[in-house]
Amino acid sequence: MEVTTKSMPYEAWKDNEYIEKLVNELRENGTNVVVGNLDKLINWGRSNSIWPLTFATSCCGIEFVSLGAARFDMARFGWEVARASPRQADFIMVAGTIVHRMAPVLRRLYDQLAEPKYVIACGACAVSGGPFRKSYHVVMGCDKIIPVDVYLPGCPPRPEAMIYSIMQLSRKIKVERFFGGVNRKQKQEEFLKEHPIPGVED
């Protein structure tokens, strides 16, 4: 099964093996026709209207803001509804440096996101600490605080790369199942228990 979008051929995607592995894991459990089609219908709607939380701490945020302007126009993908409240957002794009004092705030915002929720680590700082790697005040990647679904390298990444990363997240959403068996919420809860943050209750 080729999980892709109309505008890009299958060969243009990177890391197709990972997505195909997800598809194969989901197929192993099997599901009936009605439930399978219901999953497809739900995921079609969700993958084409994922709303980001407005969250930026440094220069990657400026690049993310340009996605809403006419040149890149993220409205054509259905992502233009950037929410200021985590309770109305589908995913958080961690755009910028996360210092240790910001870690509890990021975890709290993640906890307040509505289920199902997703995370994109945007830029070198959010992925691995970036130019501040091994420094005393910066978290070495936001995956030390919250589970990450898509990693977007760059310092800062171009808006085109951000569009690509959200399209990759959309592809992951398309192969999820709500009724057919696989549920990612359990993995999230396990991650959060293994990565406690001082001052934040799970």
Image (tube, rainbow, N blue to C red):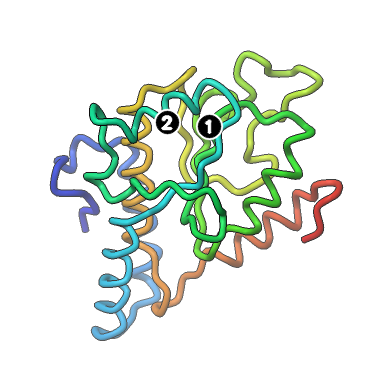
21 on left or right of 156: left
72 on left or right of 186: left
Residue 64: which disc?
2
The quarter of the image holding the C terminus is bottom right
Rendering coords of residue 18 (x, y %): 38, 47
Instruction: Report the amino acid beneath label 2.
Output: Phe
Rendering coords of residue 111 (x, y %): 65, 57
> Does label 2 or label 1 sit earlier along the sequence?
2
Of all residues shown, which one is farthest toward the right? 198
Q: CA distance from mark 2 to mark 1?
A: 8 Å
Question: Could you say which quadrant of the image residue 71 lies in?
Answer: top left
Q: How many marks?
A: 2
The quarter of the image holding the N terminus is bottom left
Closer to the camera in the image, 68 or 113: 68
Closer to the camera in the image, 36 or 110: 110
**Residue sitting at x 69%, y 28%:** 140
**Residue sitting at x 57%, y 27%:** 96
Examine the rendered structure and indicate whether residue 23 appears above or below residue 135. Answer: below
Residue 95: which disc?
1
Instruction: Report the amino acid beneath label 1.
Output: Ala
**Residue sitting at x 85%, y 46%:** 198
Is disc 1 surrounded by few (<14), some (14 to 19) or many (20+) residues within 10 Å? Answer: many
3 on left or right of 63: left
Residue contact at pointers 2 and 1, CB within 8 angstroms: yes
Determine the secondary structure under disc 1.
strand
Closer to the camera in the image, 138 or 76: 76
Rendering coords of residue 51 (x, y %): 41, 52
Examine the rendered structure and indicate whether residue 83 appears above or below residue 41. Answer: above
